[in-house]
Image (cartoon, rainbow, N blue to C red):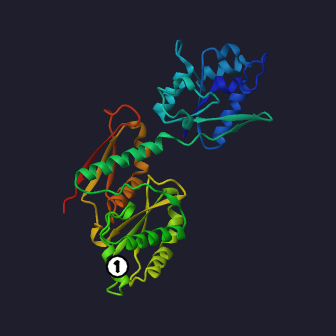
Amino acid sequence: MKVIIDASNVAHYGKGKEGSPRLDNVLKSIEALKALGYEPYTIADASLRHEIDKKEEFNKLLEDEKIVQVPSGTTADHFILKIAEEEEAKILSNDIFREYNDEFKDIASRRIPYSVKSGEIIIGTSSKPKKIKNILQKISTQCLNEFEKKGMDPYRHKKSKKLSGIAIAKEAIDRITKSKEEGIDSKLEDIFMKIPLFDKVMNMVEDAEKTSDFIVFVLVSPRDYKDAVRYAGNIAVTVGDRLKLDHAPLVAIRNDLFTKPGTFELNILYSDEVKEESKYNVNITINDHDYAFVKKNSRNIASTVAARIGTWKFPIVSVKPSMLLEKPGQFEIILEKVEN
């Protein structure tokens, strides 16, 4: 990955009131970034050549184009931010560029801070992107809206609980038990509103025919997916045993972009309601700025949509960039009917 070095900011680090900017800071930052596998690209403002401590060496670096000087009449900070956006690069700088927050989104996730210790440059870590999470959620929401327009009712309940295997099993058992106590004619709240399961549950109480033809979709953050998969078998057995079902329910773990890390949600459907595959695939057209990240996370979008509309297989999610969508955050979604 390319990292633009804000040479003026780096050179001025620790110079003191009377000191000159230090070329060694810049050179050491170049070496530190290379050692971490980055591709450094150094940009300096026009005034630095007059202030730097080692002027001849600095000017030679400019002549050899190893350091690039900002064009005359151009604001260095804006120039650096613009190049970083166009090149999808990071920026090594302790300047937070506050005055440019309206024009350049999520600068904190692009900027890499640094420090100097015993004369050596210590490379820090940039903040986690804020807008990235938001755009994935916005795309998923729009997908669900489009599916709803096509007559497919998505699960939208948001009542996250702390994630653990026993918590998931208890939640499913408690909801079913509550529905039995209230009776099958009352409107069921929360995630069970659309499950035609409870007449069968009442029959179980009367020792009549027993069945467990339902699927428990466990919705978790992508960060928790591997841990949740380990719980699946025990959850199915626990629910089946506690409710005295002839067949344990099928438990499916799904990445869900709406679920916070460390929590879970449940979308439980009677098996007749679960579709083998989606009737529609999802075509996303997006701006160049967000294209790479959204494409990388297209499977998480597909998983979120599948779990929320109750399909076993994921819809195909295709992502392509468009020059007509100029601003970060812009996207369009079209559902494409699957031909049987």
Q: Where residue 96 sits in the image (x, y, percent)?
A: 60, 29
The quadrant the C terminus occupies is bottom left
Q: Which residue is most to the bottom? A: 207
Crowding at dot 1, Cα within 10 Å, few <14 / some 14-19 / many 20+, comes out as some
- 24 sits left or right of 160 in the view: right
The quadrant the N terminus occupies is top right
Q: Where residue 302 sits in the image (x, y, percent)?
A: 36, 56
- 47 sits left or right of 116 in the view: left
Examine the image and state in which quarter residue 115 appears: top right
Q: Where residue 198 sits in the image (x, y, percent)?
A: 33, 73
Instruction: Residue at 28% x, 54% y: name it.
Output: 281
The answer to which of 322 and 108 lies nearer the viewer is: 108
- Residue 309, placed above or below residue 216: above
Examine the image and state in which quarter residue 21 appears: top right
Q: Which residue is most to the right? A: 118
- 58 sits left or right of 166 in the view: right
Disc 1 designates what residue? Answer: 202
Q: Amino acid at mark 1?
A: Met
